[in-house]
Image (cartoon, rainbow, N blue to C red):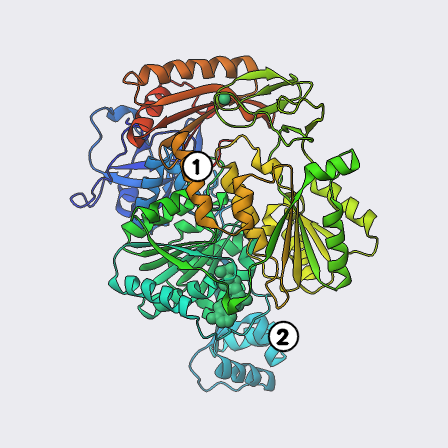
Amino acid sequence: MKTILSEPREPHSVGAASTPAFAEVALPLHVFQTFTYRLNPALSEEAVVGARIVVPLGRKLVTGYIVALTDQLSANLADVDIKDAQSLIDLEPVCSPEILQLARWVSDYYACPLGEVIKAALPPGMTPSTKRDFIKPKLRRFVRLREAGEQKLTEGQSRVVQALEQSGPMSLQALCEIAAVGASTVASLARKSRVEIYDGAVRRDPLAHASQEKPVAFTLTNAQSGVLQDIEQQIARGTYGAFLLHGVTGSGKTEVYIRTMRNALSLDRSSMMLVPEIALTPVFSRRLRAEFGDQVAIFHSSLQKGERFDEWARVKNGEARIVIGTRSAVFAPVQNLGLIVVDEEHESSYRQQESPYYNARDTAIVRAQKESATVVLGSATPSLESFYNARHGKYTLLTLPQRVGARPMALAAIIDMRNVFARHGKPRVFSDELLDAIRTTHERKEQSIILLNRRGYSRFILCRSCGETIQCPNCDVTLTYHRSERVMVCHYCNHRQAVPRVCPACEKKYIYYVGEGTEQLEEMLTQFFPALRVARIDRDTTVRRKVFEKSLADFSNGEIDTLVGTQMLAKGHDFPNVTLVGVVSVDTGLALPDFRSAERTFQLITQVAGRAGRGDRPGKVLIQTYHPYHYALRHACAQDYEAFYNEEINYRKNHSYPPFVALASLLVHGPDLGRVRSDSLELRKQLDLANEGRKCRILGPAPAPLARLKAEHRFQLLIKSRSRKHVREVADAALKTVSNLRSVNLEIDPVSIM
Ligand code: ADP
Ligand code: ZN
């Protein structure tokens, strides 16, 4: 059997054979191949590509997806080896030809198993290993009228008939309530054949309890109109076209998205809007529901399975024509797709961090190409790749350079923590400047957001006196301190050195390990200001969606004065009474051992500044740092994206990072350190063999920045080349020699190499 990894299979044509003898089945497992099963005559009659099928695998039965039907076995398969498929689950495809085609692309491009991709493309719960726990439509008893006859009706029965005449068919429960009768009254009417009781699906609506806002009718600004016109012209052409919408925070991008969706709908084409965070979806989706009513379906992972299934089904049957959702919504079975909006396109959450490793933004581009749709990537801080693509003509650049209503951008100022340290002779988490600002903001009855940019896990080393961090001599990234071994390690090339006693730059002995938590900040603020009502939002607290939404609602209602959190607070929210945003430490982010750390920091500060001063009062942003002159901070404070881009793109070019090279990372992981180390050395050897022509640069193995995760050791290798094809050839050839594929993760275009 061919592996998908090296040679993607063409879909077989079913044209000639109306009763195919074999089905090619993709299983939702981490195996890089599809399996062939024999179909008995009955199955053969009913099997369709895209349907789920139950097949034997070893001694178990598993559910897979039919990806092709064929009359002939490939030459390398012997008839006797082929097992019989057991049963079909669907008579119609759950995976349409368009989605299957997209899944094939994802599987091929990102080198991940087709079955895993299809599983990710379908609502959760549709692929369990046994048939029992399938997600199904939720059934309720409904009642409808039948023809009136000679029947004599009681008073209660008449009320039932009247209610049905007035309001049409309804659920038994609602009917009993409206007509003030018991179910037996309806049952007796059914016996008289005056009504019919039947099972109907009820919709589990994730927004059923959301308050309905009235749609707002703005007059677009000139800048908005111009942008809208360009996009509308493209939608009208009905061909593929891609835009990068670079609009500063508060420039009214959302309004543009909504109008473009309305425009697509008026041309009878559906649209899709991808958003990065679950947290943002309620805000946006309520707005969309207000605009488009039931035409909107919502896809995100914190919905209950039943809700997700129903929303998916409404899209599939064409009832819902606008989809809003997170990453996996890119696979929504939208028909006649006209437009895809990817909001905050730079966000790393578009990248799935487990297999199948795909990037929803890039998948959206490909989907738009395949389905002749328009795609709009929107951001105040476009990713370097996207802006580069716009500069080089791959995307059309559109800009909204000003905030709506000429509201000024928030003023951003840097607080030099080296001075704070010098003043107090010891480290401080909060500078006096920031504390004063929090106090006065509170006194003015305005609100503040305090942010900790802490994404890293392992800590790094910093001199409090001069701000120096310790860098790798080969790689231009920060060395990461490994406490267990008490050494500093480069996570790109494995350079190691001892922790210095004094700072190599200023020779003072203020070496310091960076890292504070949000919880600690919350506590400190409550101690400083007992009257301040503080709430915290980060990954720990957002696990529970209700708690998270309540905190945001309380903040929005003014019942909380200060919100403390991680960078997820920086995005999307619109709190008009927030006039202060403080960033406690930006340095953890700046010094992460990742080539995107400057970009991420720039994005964070810009987004954060966008949260302040969205109402009538001006906003202020204070950033505490030991690196006051870092270009990412300087340009972010000046809100100058292009200046940052120009500097950063040079860095990428000089150090051979994307978009100038294609990058792949290989992560070898397992419980046994010795084994992981020797496996990764072996992998390196195989990569070198495959790289005979030296078309790629191979780095590592080195311990991954998260050197141990979930009780597994992790080593990382990187492959770089100007040619994407070479990267894949080398990676694929080396991977073929790996016996246990589960122990190696291959990521194409990793968004971070953490
Ligand atoms: P962005 O998504 O670019 O950060 P938003 O779409 O959130 O910006 O818009 C910022 C604010 O301006 C919102 O409160 C929005 O309701 C408002 N707004 C958008 N367009 C207009 C307009 N044409 N006239 C008046 N207010 C607008
Ligand atoms: Zn290095």
Amino acid type of the residue tagged 1 in the rendering: Tyr
What is the crowding at mark 2: few (fewer than 14 residues within 10 Å), some, or many (at least 20)? some
Q: Position of residue 500 (x, y in %)?
A: 65, 18
Q: Where is residue 700 in the image (x, y as percent from the top left)?
A: 46, 19
Does residue 115 lie above or below 734 as drawn?
Answer: below
Q: Residue at 24%, 37% (x, y): give it.
A: 10
| Label pair 2/1, CB-CB below 8 angstroms | no
| 105 vs 739: above or below | below
Name the foreground residue: 58 vs 281. 281
Checking the image for residue 182, the label placed there is 2
Determine crowd level at label 1: few under 14, some 14-19, many 20+ residues with C-alpha closer than 10 A: many
2 vs 1, front mark: 1
Please say whether residue 95 is visible from this viewpoint.
Answer: no
**Is residue 363 shown to the viewer in this render?**
yes
Residue that badge 1 annotates: 357
Which element is circle 2 on?
loop
Q: Where is residue 366 in the image (x, y as percent from the top left)?
A: 32, 47
Q: Is 415 situated left or right of 310 in this image?
A: right
Left or right for 44, reference 701: left
Q: What element carries label 1?
A: loop
Mark carried by residue 654: none
Q: Nearer the viewer, residue 144 or 299?
A: 299
The quadrant of the picture occupied by the N terminus is top left
Three-letter amino acid code of the residue under disc 2: Gly
Q: Nearer the viewer, residue 15 or 274?
A: 274
Position of 141 relative to 179 (above/below): above
| Near-viewer residue (139 or 605) | 605
Mark sitting earlier along the chain (2/1): 2
- Residue 168 location in percent, x, y? 47, 78
Q: How far apart are marks 2 and 1 (CA)?
A: 54 Å
